[in-house]
Amino acid sequence: MKTVTVNASQTYEVKVGRGLLADLGKEIAPRMGKGRAVCLVSDSNVANLYLDAAQESLEDAGLRVEPFVMFAGEIHKNVRTYAKLLDYMAENQITRADALVALGGGVVGDLTGFAAATYLRGVGFFQVPTTLLAAVDASVGGKTAVDLDAGKNLAGAFYQPRLVLCDLNTLDTLPDDIFADGCAEVIKYGMIGDPDLLDKLETIDFRADPEAIVARCIEMKRDLVEADEFDTGARQLLNLGHTMGHGIEACSDYGISHGKAVAIGLTMAARTAIAHGLCPGEVLPRLIALLEQYHLPTATDYTVEALYDRVLADKKRAGETQTLVMPTAWGKSELHQVPVRELRDWIQKGLTL
Ligand SMILES: NC(=O)c1ccc[n+]([C@@H]2O[C@H](COP(=O)([O-])OP(=O)(O)OC[C@H]3O[C@@H](n4cnc5c(N)ncnc54)[C@H](O)[C@@H]3O)[C@@H](O)[C@H]2O)c1
């Protein structure tokens, strides 16, 4: 097992290893203060696989468990599901001393975190990520959100968990396709700032033994979160591939998954950076080959017209400038301020090099 400690506005541990779900109750109970009840949130797929084990472990530790199962999928990460969850907690007498446990992928984690941040102005929050994407990215760092009709993650809060418990055994039941989504975020970390990680990804298949790669990604996220918890500077590097990716997700009405959209967004960022002379040309074919090795898409048919409004709705726009993350070398990226009037051209270059 590996433990990464995050020193943000709340200090917490991220534990990564096999078989940790059995200890969920033992890990959470001492971090509950006076609270004795948890609302255990999961989605319809994950609940079938892991809800009973999680509930049993929590009850064995003396906690009252109120399970809430939402429909699976990004289209349910919305205000309606969020409101249902709040009502459910109120009906089941969840108090300020109690807590929410998110058992699932990034959708469950983001929505549960936002409920934890806002219910009674904030209750305890624990993350139990069950996708690779949630393990390496969504469960750590305290960004919580739901989507609005206008775009992704437009209502949310910064709210750190008290503990993240990542049982790598849960990743074994992920369909290949969903494991691949997480690989897009792993490759993103490499492109942000770790050429050694990229080299490793080119030579090994880490699915059978993911601990070291997952822990390395969490350390990178930890470093950026500690440097800039509220996302006004260095943390924005984590958005590499995401500004265009969010646009692609929204254009597809969330038919294209977050991970696949980020993969395409990574190649768009590389194309744009190369076209602007910010990045050497050889980065693009190597990046495309790595993404294809992990069964990820590298291009989109959406036009600049389709993407422009969606990209403009992105949270990273401040007034008349948009922050874009641009790769500048293999395993290195930087932030760039782009005037909104030039954005259309930057998107176009990402589509056409
Ligand atoms: N908060 C953050 O910092 C952050 C960072 C990155 C992404 N995100 C968000 O994360 C979300 C994407 O997360 P995701 O890719 O985990 O999607 P997801 O939560 O929708 O999970 C993908 C699918 O896998 C299923 N699943 C989950 N665990 C499983 C398991 N162990 N075995 C079998 N099936 C399982 C789910 O039911 C779902 O159908 C997006 O909403 C994105 O915006 C948030």
Image: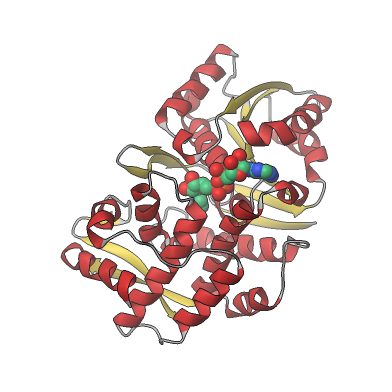
Q: Is residue 225 left or right of residue 219?
A: left
Residue 34 x/y as whole percent:
68, 24
Specify how the rendered protein is coloured: secondary structure
Residue 83 x/y as whole percent:
45, 23
Residue that lies at the very extreme toward the front in this rendered image: 301
Is residue 142 visible in the rendered image? The answer is no
Q: Give the quarter of the figure containing the N terminus.
A: bottom right
Looking at the image, residue 129 lies above or below residue 273: above
Q: Residue at x 68, y 31 (%)?
A: 47
Q: Is residue 125 left or right of residue 62?
A: left
Is residue 343 visible in the rendered image? The answer is yes
Front position in the image: 224 or 293: 293
Q: Give the quarter of the figure containing the C terminus.
A: bottom left
Where on the picture, by quarter, is residue 270?
A: bottom left
Looking at the image, residue 87 lies above or below residue 273: above
Front position in the image: 232 or 16: 16
Q: Tally the numbered discs.
A: 0
Q: Residue at x 66, y 66 (%)?
A: 216
Looking at the image, residue 33 lies above or below residue 2: above
Residue 315 x/y as whole percent:
33, 51
Residue 225 x/y as whole percent:
51, 58
Front position in the image: 43 or 189: 43
Q: Residue at x 34, y 54 (%)?
A: 247
